[in-house]
Image (cartoon, rainbow, N blue to C red):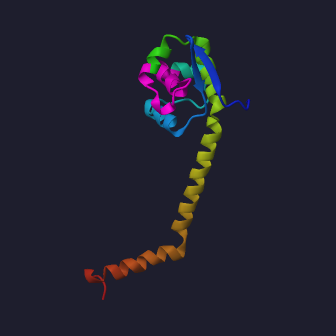
Amino acid sequence: MSGKKEFQYEISGNIYIQKPLVLGQIRQLFNLLEKILLPACIDAMGLIAVLGDKLPQVIAIVLTPDGIALKDKDIIALSKEIEFEISPEQVIQVIDDFFTCNPIQSLLGRIGGMVENLTRKIQEIGLNPSSASSPAEILQRGTASSGDSL
């Protein structure tokens, strides 16, 4: 993997930039792709096939016209513009560069590790005898008027 974190493409005379994703782009991608299941091992052509008619919008989310702020992009208009201007070779290059810009496997591994760590901590808290007995004492005092206690 190269250390390059920004890529430029000329599509129909316009310059587009791809940089590492930011939170807003991740949200846009999740919203667009929420019902699509991606296989663990997939290449660029497989990804193109899985994305189908959503591919132009994905590219519009990932690429930004030079000089335009991410938050100011019109994803729908941009996807319509790019769809009939980008070559198949450029599509494959954009996808390949996407994985160079965004180490998805590394991020997923870190998130998985965080979830495992959080789960372990929650289980430790639940198994702690002193914390388990404290709520019971509070509950007994709180229900004294229920008639079950002396």
Q: Is residue 32 left or right of residue 21?
A: left
Q: Is residue 83 visible?
A: yes
Q: Residue at x 26, y 83 (%)?
A: 145
Is the C terminus in the top left, top right, bottom left or bottom right quadrant?
bottom left
Q: Position of residue 128 (x, y in %)?
A: 55, 71
Compared to residue 60, the image places residue 116 above or below, namely: below
Q: Is residue 147 left or right of residue 135?
A: left
Q: Residue at x 47, y 23 (%)?
A: 57
Q: Position of residue 50 (x, y in %)?
A: 51, 22
Compared to residue 102, the image places residue 122 above or below, namely: below
Seen from this angle, which residue lies furthest front? Answer: 67
Is the N terminus in the top left, top right, bottom left or bottom right quadrant?
top right
Front-most of residues 126 and 31 = 31
Q: Residue at x 62, y 13 (%)?
A: 89
Seen from this angle, which residue lies furthest bottom? Answer: 150
Q: Position of residue 14 (x, y in %)?
A: 55, 15
In this picture, which residue range is highlighted in magenta? 50-77
Residue 119 in magenta stretch: no
Seen from this angle, which residue lies furthest right? Answer: 2
Q: Position of residue 71 (x, y in %)?
A: 47, 33
The majority secondary structure of the magenta stretch comes to helix
Q: Is residue 35 visible?
A: no
Q: What number of labels is visible? A: 0
Q: Residue at x 61, y 18 (%)?
A: 9
Compared to residue 144, the image places residue 120 above or below, namely: above
Residue 62 in magenta stretch: yes
Front-most of residues 148 and 134 = 134
